[in-house]
Image: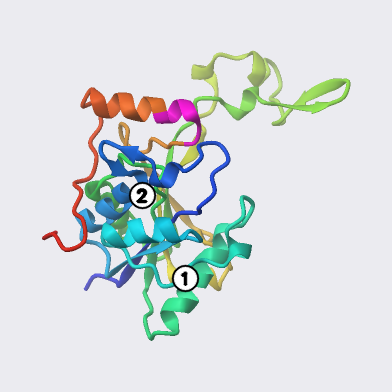
Amino acid sequence: MRPSAVALIPARGGSLRVPGKNVRLLGGHPLIAYAIGAARESGCFDAIVCSTDDAATAEIARRYGAEVPGLRPAALATSTSPDIEWVRNVREVLASDGRTFELFSILRPTSPFRTGATIRRALDLLLEHSPPADSVRAVELCRQHPGKMWVIEEPFMRPLLDQPDGVPFHSSQYQSLPPVYAQNSSLEIAWTRVLDDPGDIAGRNVVPFLTEGEEGFTVDYPDDWDRAEMLVARGEARLPVMVQSGEPG
């Protein structure tokens, strides 16, 4: 029997790097709509819940089929608020209504090319490795290797990582460096128990979910938005099918 699961879609009203990005139109729909659409398309969730501090965003989320059980407290919606705080807040609000779930997934609006199929693959991967897996998180090969990163300590700088004997990482070709993966924002799925032990959103045993093609693409900067529009215009990336509230889905 499939574990009960809730999709959590975080959508703060403020965005410093791309103002208003969660509700900005891409391919004719607000960015947040594609996170909701992917969750619906996946068929994996018993509930789809948006956590936002913004009333306008909440209305858009409801229109596309998400629940918004009250606005997120402002103290949990700053640019430095950790995810664990708002996730626990949503869990408490739902639990107060007698609703609990074995799994939760965070689907950030900033990854519009993640689809229902992406989510199903990730969930299957988590279940395949559970136990002892606590969660699955989307990753991709890093483009800027940490072996070539530096920390400035005026007037000099030092490598971020300890360097090997012989040729240092920062003087080596990328292909000769050990593979390192960077997380992207497309998804994470975890057993709800990790919120209490160890008290975070990932747990201790995290399974890597390697995204394919553009499904891990993330809108973090203005030029990312330009690329997203180009990918849509050229038909080079697939967006989830959109269904607004009241339409068959």
Q: Measured along the vertical axis of the image, is residue 33 above or below residue 53? A: above
Task: Specify the farthest residue to the front.
Answer: 56
Determine the residue positioned at 42% across, 50% down. Answer: 108
Helix, strand or loop for disc 2: helix
- Looking at the picture, tell me which residue is in the foreground, 116 or 143: 116
Tell me the quarter of the picture where residue 225 sits. top left
Q: How is the image coloured?
A: rainbow
- Looking at the picture, tell me which residue is in the foreground, 27 or 231: 27
Quadrant in which the C terminus is drawn: bottom left
Q: Is residue 189 visible?
A: no
Q: Measured along the vertical axis of the image, is residue 26 above or below residue 50? A: above
Q: Is residue 153 left or right of residue 225?
A: right
Q: Earlier in the sequence, mark 1 or mark 2?
A: 2
Viewer-nearest of labels 1 and 2?
2
Q: Residue 172: percent from the left, percent from the top?
A: 60, 14
Disc 2 designates what residue? Answer: 32
Mainly helix, strand or loop, the magenta region?
helix
Magenta stretch encompasses residue 24: no
Q: Is residue 117 visible?
A: yes
Quadrant in which the N terminus is drawn: bottom left
- Residue 90, label in figure: 1
Determine the residue positioned at 66% across, 25% down. Answer: 149
Tell me the quarter of the picture where residue 173 sits. top right
Q: Residues within 10 Å of mark 2 (few under 14, many from 20)?
A: many
**Residue flagged by tag 2: what amino acid is it?**
Ile
Tell me the quarter of the picture where residue 146 sits. top right
Q: Residues within 10 Å of mark 1 (few under 14, many from 20)?
A: many
Magenta residues? 220-225
- Looking at the picture, tell me which residue is in the foreground, 239 or 171: 239
Q: Is residue 103 left or right of residue 239?
A: right
**Residue flagged by tag 1: what amino acid is it?**
Val
Q: Measured along the vertical axis of the image, is residue 86 above or below residue 213? A: below
